[in-house]
Amino acid sequence: MSVKIQQQLYTRERGGIFHTTDGYDTIAISEGLDQGFVKKYLHPFCMYHSPKTLAERGEKDASLYPEAVTMFQPETGELVIGQAVFVPADFTGSRSTYFMHNYIIPGARKDEWIKHPEKLFQMNDFQTSYDLVSGKVLPEREAVGYKDSDILTIKSDLLGALGITEENFKQLLFAVMSSIAGKKKVFISLNVPIQDYTNYALELLELLYLFLPYAHRRRLGAMTFTSEPESKNYIHVTFFEPGRLNIGDRAIEKQYIFDFAGNRIYGVDLAGQQHEYLDLALHHFHHSERMDDFFEFAEMALAGLPEAPKLDVASYYQLTDMYLATRFNDLSLYEKNKAGFLHSLLKFLQVNSDKKPDLTRLFVELLRQEKVAADKATALDYLHAVVSINAFVRSDEPLFFILETLMYYKNDPLFKQLWKTIEQDLATHEALVMFMNEHADYEDIFELYLNERFKPLVLLEDLLNELKAIAGTPYLIGIEKFKSVVRKKISAAISSEGNPFKAVMTVKNFRLDRPSAAFDKLKQELLAHAKLSLLRSIRLQNLTLPDITAFGDIFTKELNVKDLKDVKAKENYLITNALYELISYPSQAGLVNLKSLTVAAREQLREILLRLLRNNPLPEQFPLLLTVFETEFDGVDYQGVLDYLIKYSDDKTLLSFLRGNARLVEIDFGYRRSLRKYLISHPRSIWKNKTLRKELQFIKNYSFQKLLKEVETETASPVVKFFKKNGLKLGLALVILGGVGGGTWFTLDLVFGGDTPVPKTEKTAAGARPDKSTPNEDKKEGSVVSLELFTKADPEKADQAAILNLNSKHVKSIIGQAQGAALTDINGHVFQIDFIPQSGAVPFDQNGVLKMGYTLYGTEYDFDAADDSFEVVLFAKALQPAESYLFVYSLKTNNTIDRIMPILTMNGVSNVKLDDKKLTLQSGDKEIIKEYKKETTTFSDPEN
């Protein structure tokens, strides 16, 4: 559309622009006016509603009919203002009609009229008729004629003539602004002569317009006369014929009604509320002053904001406060609600703040005046506004204000909340953090902030989530104080985790959505501290196979243990790392150097392996068992390996071990003896399984097969055993029996060994118990008994108590218990024998099961045949001699005491020998001799 003013004429004629037939139509337009615009926007407003009082009496005098001026502004941006007048007769001369003339002011120029209301409301350049002979084209106009009088000079007379008070005017102004911003309409009736109605309406509109902000002026639509109130698009204010208000119409009832003719006002109530803008407008009204300065201030403050806040009445209440503060240094409204004032300021500074210097200066000046947010009740809200505004203003003054406020509340719980507010703006947060980090005066509040921020974060997951949130603040990540706090928190979290290995893996696998070199560097530092915390918190006695596997995933590179200053961490690392190497590559267990570990550490490692392998060790794990049972002189306690497998493995696993280590039978006497005993007498011996027995017999080793022959003989029935043992001699005997009838017994006796006495049958006294023959019983007083002749406890199942079957002259068995053992004599009496309570002195756990790494030996021995007592010697041998214990008990042959304490306890023993009254013990390189004293039933050093 052209930038010139366009025109349109509308009436009833013999054809027009859009119709060739008789009727209402546009009869002439300017060339620059789009016909589509005419039909869509102008035609709906080309109307005239005659006053019903005149129409009802058929009045033909046109001078009695008021003009109807319509002004509206469609969304296309133009300002349309037109006038309709009553015409008594149309072209036929028989019917009345109306004639309308519209001016269309282009949007690019309408501010000329917006800011000069007289150009609109005093326009006097409307046509009331048109001769079609002049053509259908109207000229484009540069200007439109108007009167140029000051409406303010007659304001009092005008309101007086209309019966409108200043309070009514204030209500009208509020209603018109609210209508433009919302959906409600304003309907007005005036108590004036009908022919002068539009003149008064235009004057009242112009007076209201003077006090309307520019944003509202750019939207206002009005009609100066209609016969009845009716809502119409683009129209906000409608003047209607007095007496034509339909009170029962609910649609009308909800609008703003100013029926001055009927002395009724509906829908507006300003009482009891503060209306800063309306008060300012009324102040200017009283002084007959225009408000252009305020409106320009508002235009500046509202620049860049959406349409809604530009039209919101509340925006102008807020702007009034700021206008008074900037123009007149009036801070009375600020003092009433400081935080609210700042939040209002934020509303306008959040867009185009660089183009709003008046508001920026006001903000800075207020902070200089306040110095600190000293009012605790509003401090948080006030600081929130300061931080929010600073996000757009960026000035040093807000930063100093925030710092002083933090210092003011550093010992108050509010301190943490203030920081939460500051964190909402990264730029403000960064500026504060960097400033505090570089200035020692603020070092304490920075450290306090970090501690407070991380204080509630205890779980590792929460810490990592916080670090992910902080990843957006790289300036914080690089500060040493921050890293120090985070390292401590991560270390503490790892130590408190139920599974520290899983926790460290979580740290290791922690990633950001977006790569960050600064964060990656921090993560490596945190991971190093997490690893150290893990090493400190490892509980070796509770290690599991998944833990050890995780250890290998965590420590992918071997540590330089010299760098580990923490002794516990160092030892835990060495032991766990060795365990990882052993378990990960069991076939290479022999290559793992355990000599770098202390004796105690090696013992711990062996105990851990024994525990981990207890659940049926696999054949590929046999090398681990060899490591466990390795002696201090680079040998292997194969007997211990065998006993362990007998106790904890299944038959196939044990068979696999025996097959792979058949050669041990010929080189390790202890191993051979244990294997022979197991195969012959163990209740779960694989010899009893025919299938597995065949597998044993397939093992190609001479010594092993020889052992099996012995086992086969010992486990055969007595008859078979007899024939196997005496097959040749029995054949000779049968020949002799065939040739000689008598002397049979003598011959058999001669053949089978004449040194065997002929069995005799002797009668015993009634009730007498026949003697049992045992190995210990055959030993004469003074004979030497070494550890090899002691009875070794039967290998027990993992959940069964240890059993020592002595079957000696007086003692049948000893069964392990939690704090000692139960001794059963040959008569079935049970006695409790105790151990001296000291660290590690009890070789049994709470279930009576022999503790890991111990082997129990025992024997009955009489140190003095002349007394009426005998002794029982128990030896709990450990893998490490320092952990071995010896106990000696003295029992009467007619003992009646149920609980027996040891008469001698020794530890650190590696071997034992009984010789007459002497007890010889091997402890390291030393030989200790103790001599039995009958008088005191104790042992003492021998006399020289």
Image (cartoon, grey):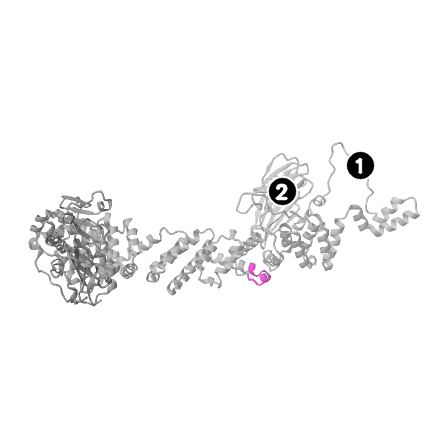
The percent coordinates of residue 230 (x first, y second) are 21, 50
Q: Which of pointers 2 and 1 lies earlier in the amino acid sequence?
A: 1
Query: Which residue is more in the foreground, 602 or 403?
Result: 403
For the record, the magenta segment spans 582-594
Res 490 → quadrant: bottom left
The residue tagged 2 is 815
The residue tagged 1 is 762
Q: Residues within 10 Å of mark 2 (few under 14, many from 20)?
A: some
Res 363 → quadrant: bottom left
The percent coordinates of residue 744 (x first, y second) are 89, 45
Above or below, comparing residue 318 to residue 516 in the picture: above
Residue 399 shows in the view: no
As drawn, the label of residue 513 is: none
The type of residue carrying mark 2 is Ile
Residue at the spot x=42%, y=58% of the render? 529
Residue at the spot x=62%, y=42% of the render? 815
Per the image, label 2 sits on a secondary structure element best described as strand
773 to the left or right of 229: right
The percent coordinates of residue 57 (x first, y second) are 14, 47
The type of residue carrying mark 1 is Glu
Judged from this view, the residue extending furthest toward the top is 766
Query: Which residue is more in the foreground, 456 or 126?
Result: 126
Res 835 → quadrant: top right
